[in-house]
Amino acid sequence: MEKIKETLNYLRNKIDNFKPEIAIVLGSGLGVFCDDISGVSIKYSEIPNFLTSGILGHKGELVYCKIFEKNCVIMHGRFHYYEGYSMQDCTFWIKVLKMAGVKTLIITNAAGGINKGFNIGDIVLINDHINFMGTNPLIGRNNNSLGERFPDMSNVYDFNLRNLAKKCAYDLNIEIKEGVYLATTGPSYETAAEIKAFSILGADVVGMSCVPEAIVSNYLKINTLAFSIVTNFATGISKNKLSHDEVLLTGKKAGLKLSSLIKKIINKID
Ligand code: HPA
């Protein structure tokens, strides 16, 4: 709690009275979201208790801005468990943003397509997840002032927000798919046998983020919405080998479409 307050005080001094209500976390290659946005940027490296992200395609700054008159904060770059940080440290920022006033979190990420009906470049509205990371960011002593010890997980990806997302996609004539996100720790991609198993388990996409963030966001009672961009077919679904460059390139192209969808959703959020 002391750490959260210290970080919050630092940020408040930087941004005066700006109270963010909507947070957006940008996944690999989704930096295009910020291209037409002007705001106040603060580097993670300057923020007390924040980690620094060293992954290609992640900028590592918070951007405070207005999108359609709504007060927003963009996490331009996220922290991954595979970087060696604890689950708690990877999700610390969500607690800070909750205390800052954030009521809605929109998560974006790059993912591999498992569902054979999905194509590279597809936008997938995540309707549920499978935590295959073998750990949980809520492990440890619980602070009851933040959330419950055993949080319900039946509406992690908020039903009303998902409906709003579908309506906005329809209005913009953007096709979106829907499905279950399975998270592994990474950093190695999956084997073909693992992808086959995940498919049987009910996963539609696979990635190395999203789930810890969604668990903490739900715990804090922040309304959560999440999208994947299918940047590649998961191992064994196609014959090609996986490369991070391919992930970044596709992320950028579909990122433009997803950016306009998210902005429309922000416009329509009450
Ligand atoms: N697997 C795991 N994470 C990913 C993938 C994948 O195929 N593509 C992008 N992130």
Image (tube, rainbow, N blue to C red):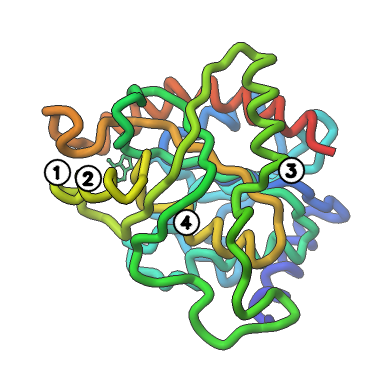
Callout 2, which amino acid?
A: Ile
Q: CA distance from mark 3 to mark 1?
A: 40 Å
Q: Residue at x 70, y 57 (%)?
A: 222
Q: Position of residue 125 (x, y in %)?
A: 53, 35
Q: Tell me the CA gap for discs 4 and 3.
A: 22 Å
Three-letter amino acid code at disc 3?
Answer: Cys
Helix, strand or loop status at disc 4: helix
**Residue 1, percent from left and from top:** 68, 81
Quote the CA–CA distance across marks 2 and 1.
Answer: 5 Å
Q: Which residue is mark 2?
A: 195
Q: Secondary structure at mark 2?
A: helix
Disc number for residue 211: 4
Q: CA distance from mark 3 to mark 2?
A: 36 Å
Q: Nearer the viewer, mark 3 or mark 1?
A: 1
Q: Nearer the viewer, mark 3 or mark 2?
A: 2
Q: Residues within 10 Å of mark 1 (few under 14, many from 20)?
A: some
Q: Are marks 2 and 1 in contact (CB under 8 Å)?
A: yes
Q: Residue at x 46, y 38 (%)?
A: 179
Closer to the chain start, of discs 4 and 1, is: 1
- Regarding residue 56, the answer to whether it shows in the image is no
- Disc 3 crowd rating (10 Å Cα; few below 14, some 14-19, many 20+) is many
In which quarter of the view is residue 76 placed? top right
Amino acid type of disc 4? Val
Q: Which element carries disc 3, helix, strand or loop?
A: strand
Residue that extends furthest to the right in the rendered view of this protein: 17
The residue lying at 52 percent from left, 24 percent from top is 176
Along the polypeptide, which appears first: circle 2 or circle 4?
2
Count numbered badges in the picture: 4
The picture places residue 168, in percent across and down from the top left corner, at 69, 23
User: Which residue is tagged 3?
Assistant: 72
Quadrant in the picture for the C terminus: top right
